[in-house]
Amino acid sequence: MLNSIHKTKGKTEHSVKKYVSVPDLRLAEIEIRLKNIFEEELKSKNSIIISYKPEIISKLARYISGHINRPASIGIAGETASGKSTITMDIIDTLNSFSSEFDIDNIITRVNTDDYYYDRSDMVKKAGSFANFAKHYDLDVPEALELELMNSDIKDLLSGKPVYLPKYDMSGTAKRYDNYTLAKPSKIIISEGLFTLTEKIKDAFDFKIYVDVRHNVQKERFFVRAKERDLGDSANGIYKNAAQKAEVYIRPCKKDADIVLSGEAVRVCYKNFLNKIISVVVQQHFSK
């Protein structure tokens, strides 16, 4: 914006002239389209969006327009059984479909927060079972995970370095295999987990998402999962502890989130919303 002051017949005439480059004009147009997409979704019946911070629109627009020309990282957090892993997989599937259609290489890499739990396999063997181990070891605090390593791995990927990620055995052994999975740098790095937006890791993410869910829905999902994992009588105690620790460590992360999503929406709705954003990308970069 340029402010010009001209003297005319003894009077001061103020005129404001706007000089907008073509890229900036496109950026403004992208922001308008994105805002419309977000607002329409927010106002729709059974919206996947509970709330969002307005500044997320301009940041997303800068990535889509190319004003920010580097990989982006997305962190997704929420309580146990909130739906965050399902939403993450739907995002990955949708982006992979987009990359296949337009022949885009290395579009997204997943870094699973749960894989950074410390190896406690010796403790499980000593306890005789994972259920007995879980009675005396707290898995529902950030200190149970090596989040500093996760932070370093994500930042290495964002800087273009390939990384060997750990792999945690969720079947009940509490075994972690280090340097297990080769992760290649990609355009988007995505992570999800209970503690993905806590203090030691949240600065690794450009876009922070919190998945919220009603208490009764989450509790029902938890006990279905507990049965699948054969937690037995320890399920009640584990759930009580998880709920207490979530109040301290997880729920406060909601305030740092750029977007709060509902973990109860029909799955196809997440993909539909993302495809609307992808349509802006297509118009910007792939339209003739």
Image (cartoon, rainbow, N blue to C red):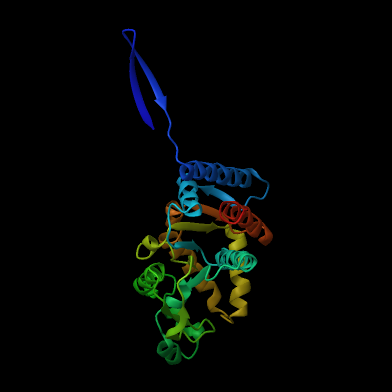
Q: How far from the left and from the top, in percent, is residue 164?
A: 42, 81
Q: Is residue 65 above or below residue 229?
A: above
Q: Is residue 3 above or below residue 10?
A: below
Residue at position x 39%, y 61% in the image: 202
Q: How far from the left and from the top, in percent, is residue 104?
A: 57, 67
The quadrant where residue 127 appears: bottom left
Residue at position x 60%, y 51% in the image: 283
The quadrant where residue 166 appears: bottom left
In this image, 224 relative to 174: left or right?
Answer: right
Q: How far from the left and from the top, in percent, is residue 252?
A: 42, 56
Residue 117 in sight here:
no
- Residue 187 or residue 113, whichever sits in front: 187
**Total marks drawn?**
0
- Residue 271 or residue 77, whichever sits in front: 271
In this image, 41 relative to 245: left or right?
Answer: right
Q: Is residue 163 above or below residue 63?
A: below
Q: How far from the left and from the top, in percent, is residue 71?
A: 44, 63
Residue 3 in sight here:
yes
Q: Quadrant of the N terminus?
A: top left
In this image, 205 relative to 261: left or right?
Answer: left
